[in-house]
């Protein structure tokens, strides 16, 4: 065959021309010949921090690990996503390579492919031949053995950083994580469970201190505001380095009309924070709104999908330490059965999505930005169910009618969680009104518990915030909002803020009469509150008239032996003076017996009746009869409530006055001096009750002085 054949080739193609029979076999390999990282000699970071803030103690520990002559160590930096583990590793890398004379090697450990290619690149850097690397890639030689042979034989000491090793099984499969006398290994991971890191030293990386967190913002946006404004925004961002960096970057990149820190705070939400991820939005590790999803996905892959439901429940509460006892007996049906709560919690702990708080009270702490992000991402269909369960668990821990003088310690830690729940449900978002009412009931019970424990400042803070939050969904006329206002008025009186207490108590009484009628229990309770305010402010007659109305109304509606009726009946003994008091005294012994028979001899209502009977005897001019009762009342109160409780101090003050009235001045002065000291310390020197005690002490001392 004659003739000419024209052909053209491109790329890796070939053109063959032949005469006769030919058999040609050709293999084409497409794509790059090297799929590994471009370098292992520098950190693979989306952004490098300008300055590493705080971390002084942690960096001292890590610098010692790369000091000359050290080796054979594995350190694991673990913590919540976005807490700055990689930034710490980057700082150590710079120190080890610039000042420590070490070779720095950086590998991405987030998945098997990245880890394998990175570690083989490390082997190449440390002298592995192309033939050895080819054998390792093709499976003819154990890849990890090759890497560690080359690291063991390195001519220079090294620091190997394995970053983002959030799934430790990636390291375990194939034996990639080892130690060598020639160098130090540093791993960053969200996984904190010690079982994954045998022989390694675990170092937790947390959020920044307040001043350092504020300085991160000022490093990035120095002209955006003052140090105080930066500290306020840092607190709202939970002092999480990722959130701080994104916020500072956002402020720094504005051109036309830059915001101040104050303006940023006014618009602050998760979406706004993420706008600081300039050029990095494709990587979920650089977004606050999605960085937690990496950890939740890892927990789910371990067979714990219920962990997401548990985290969504935790997001109903606050970032403050949460008592673990709150989760006892938790059951959310198929989404989170009771038997899966413990494993789900362990999964969250192991992946640094929450942490245990050291101390005698076993608690959990979950970062606030994480909780806000999770709450925002919770499906609307689940929000009501989760919020209802959150309220149910809180109500279970808060007594409905607590005794006076109870220790406040079990209740104070619940305050931020009660208010956070009420804040979330009051904002709407598909939560039904009964759930809002349950959250408001939690706040009411908490305020009552704090008030009766003697922690008036906390009770006032909870009550006032709860009123503002609850009225947003329930309205000012809702019964629970009215009861919260009653509690606030009581606490304002306890704190000596009589004018504010009277204004609120009068308004609440007027509203109760309009909403519920003149003899409704809530209306009569408002009468009691206003009566006590007026009496304490020196208007005994007006206060006594209101208390008489409360007593008569409660007898008619609830009966004479109902606990709240008995309490109103003995309170009026304290308010009356003159002939009215003399008439009421006639029935006082029978009232004390009725309290003892109905409530028990050691009940706080019986104790209150005994104290007020002694008080009435004293003000009726029968000090000798009052003295033994006053002494018993003081001893019982001190035994029941402790020496600093207000009922104890009131009974001690009465004892001192009664002793003075019968001429026992030395003992009277000693008791009143103790009252003055304790009230000055607890209530402050400017509180009206402290002032009354100081005046009484002066009178007793003057009466004790011999006549000249």
Image: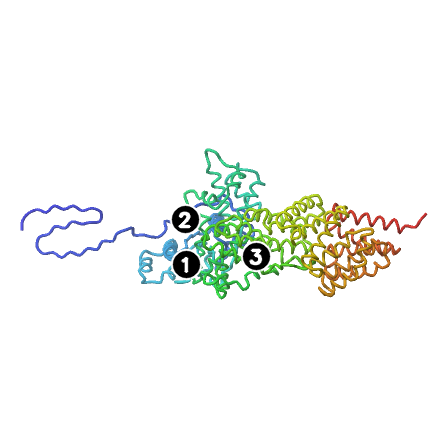
Q: Which residue is mark 1?
A: 153
Structural crowding at the residue carrying mark 3, measured as other residues with C-alpha within 10 Å and reported as few (<14), some (14–19) or many (≥20): many
Residue 397 visible, this orientation:
yes
Q: Earlier in the sequence, mark 1 or mark 3?
A: 1
Q: Position of residue 102 (x, y in %)?
A: 46, 52
Cβ–Cβ under 8 Å for marks 3 and 2: no
**Secondary structure beneath disc 3?**
strand
For marks 1 and 2, give the CA distance.
36 Å
The residue that disc 2 covers is 283
**Which tag is nearer the camera, tag 1 or tag 3?**
3
Residue 651's mark?
Answer: none
The image quadrant of residue 572 is: bottom right
Residue 322: assigned label: 3
SS of the residue at dot 2?
loop
Give percent across and percent down for residue 597: 73, 66
Q: Is residue 658 left or right of residue 472?
A: right
Tags 1 and 2 touching, CB below 8 Å: no
Q: Is residue 638 above or below residue 506?
A: below
Q: Nearer the viewer, mark 1 or mark 2?
A: 2
Return the disc, 1 or 2, that comes first in the chain's sequence: 1
Q: Nearer the viewer, residue 422 or 594?
A: 594
């Amino acid at each position: 065959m004659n003739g000419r054949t024209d052909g053209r080739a491109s790329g890796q193609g070939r053109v063959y021309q032949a005469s006769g029979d030919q058999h040609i076999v050709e293999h084409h390999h497409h794509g790059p010949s090297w799929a590994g990282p471009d370098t292992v000699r520098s950190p693979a970071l989306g952004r490098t921090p300008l300055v590493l803030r705080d971390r002084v103690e942690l960096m001292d520990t890590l610098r010692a690990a790369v000091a000359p002559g050290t080796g054979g160590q594995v350190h694991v930096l673990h913590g919540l996503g976005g807490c700055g583990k990689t930034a710490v590793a980057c700082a150590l890398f710079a120190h080890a390579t610039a000042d420590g004379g070490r070779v720095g090697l950086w590998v991405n450990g987030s998945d098997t492919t990245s880890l394998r290619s990175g570690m083989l690149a490390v082997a190449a850097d440390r002298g592995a031949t192309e033939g050895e690397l080819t054998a390792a890639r093709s499976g003819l030689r154990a890849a990890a053995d090759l890497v560690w042979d080359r690291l063991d034989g390195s001519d220079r000491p090294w620091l190997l950083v394995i970053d983002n090793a959030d799934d430790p099984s990636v390291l375990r499969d194939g034996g990639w994580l080892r130690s060598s006398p020639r160098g130090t290994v540093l791993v960053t991971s969200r996984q904190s469970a010690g079982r994954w890191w045998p022989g390694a030293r675990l170092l937790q990386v947390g959020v920044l201190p307040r001043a350092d967190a504020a300085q991160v913002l000022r490093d990035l946006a120095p002209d955006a505001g003052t140090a105080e404004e930066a500290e306020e925004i840092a607190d709202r961002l939970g002092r999480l380095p990722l959130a701080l960096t994104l916020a500072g970057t956002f402020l720094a990149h504005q051109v036309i009309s830059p915001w101040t820190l104050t303006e940023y705070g006014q618009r602050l939400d998760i979406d706004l924070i993420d706008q600081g991820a300039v050029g990095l939005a494709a990587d979920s590790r650089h977004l606050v709104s999605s960085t937690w999803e990496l950890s939740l996905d890892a927990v789910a892959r371990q067979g714990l999908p219920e962990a997401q439901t548990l985290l969504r429940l935790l997001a109903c509460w606050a970032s403050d330490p949460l008592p673990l006892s709150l989760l006892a007996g938790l059951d959310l049906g198929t989404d989170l059965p009771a038997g899966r709560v413990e494993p789900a919690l362990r999964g969250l702990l192991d992946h640094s999505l929450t942490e245990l708080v050291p101390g005698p009270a076993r608690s959990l702490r979950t970062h606030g930005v994480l909780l806000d992000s999770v709450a925002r991402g919770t499906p609307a269909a689940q929000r009501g169910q989760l919020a209802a369960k959150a309220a149910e668990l809180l109500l279970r821990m808060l007594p409905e009618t607590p005794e006076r003088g109870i220790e406040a310690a079990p209740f104070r830690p619940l305050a931020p969680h009660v208010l956070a729940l009420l804040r979330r449900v009051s904002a709407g978002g598909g939560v039904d009104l009964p759930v809002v009412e349950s959250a408001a009931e939690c706040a009411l019970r908490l305020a009552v518990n704090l008030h009766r424990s003697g922690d008036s400042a906390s009770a006032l803070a909870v009550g006032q915030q709860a009123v503002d939050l609850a009225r947003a969904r329930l309205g000012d006329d809702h019964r629970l909002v009215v009861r919260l206002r009653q509690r606030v008025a009581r606490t304002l009186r306890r704190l000596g803020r009589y004018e504010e207490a009277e204004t609120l108590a009068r308004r609440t009484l007027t509203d109760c009469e309009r909403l519920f009628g003149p003899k409704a229990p809530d209306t009569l309770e408002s009468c009691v509150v206003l009566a006590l305010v007026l009496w304490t402010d020196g208007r005994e007659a007006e206060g006594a008239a209101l208390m008489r109305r409360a007593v008569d109304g409660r007898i008619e509606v609830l009966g004479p032996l109902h606990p709240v009726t008995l309490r109103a009946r003995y309170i009026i003994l304290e308010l009356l003076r003159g002939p009215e008091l003399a008439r009421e005294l006639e029935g006082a012994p029978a009232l004390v017996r009725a309290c003892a028979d109905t409530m028990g001899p050691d009940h706080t209502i019986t104790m209150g009746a005994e104290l007020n009977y002694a008080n009435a005897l004293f003000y009726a001019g029968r000090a000798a009869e009052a003295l033994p009762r006053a002494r018993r009342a003081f001893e019982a109160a001190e035994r029941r409530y402790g020496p600093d409780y207000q009922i104890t101090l009131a009974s001690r003050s009465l004892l001192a006055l009664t002793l003075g009235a019968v001429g026992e001045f030395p003992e009277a002065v000693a008791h009143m001096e103790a009252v003055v000291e304790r009230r000055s310390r607890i209530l402050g020197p400017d509180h009206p009750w402290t002032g009354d005690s100081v005046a009484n002490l002066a009178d007793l001392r003057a009466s004790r002085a011999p006549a000249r």
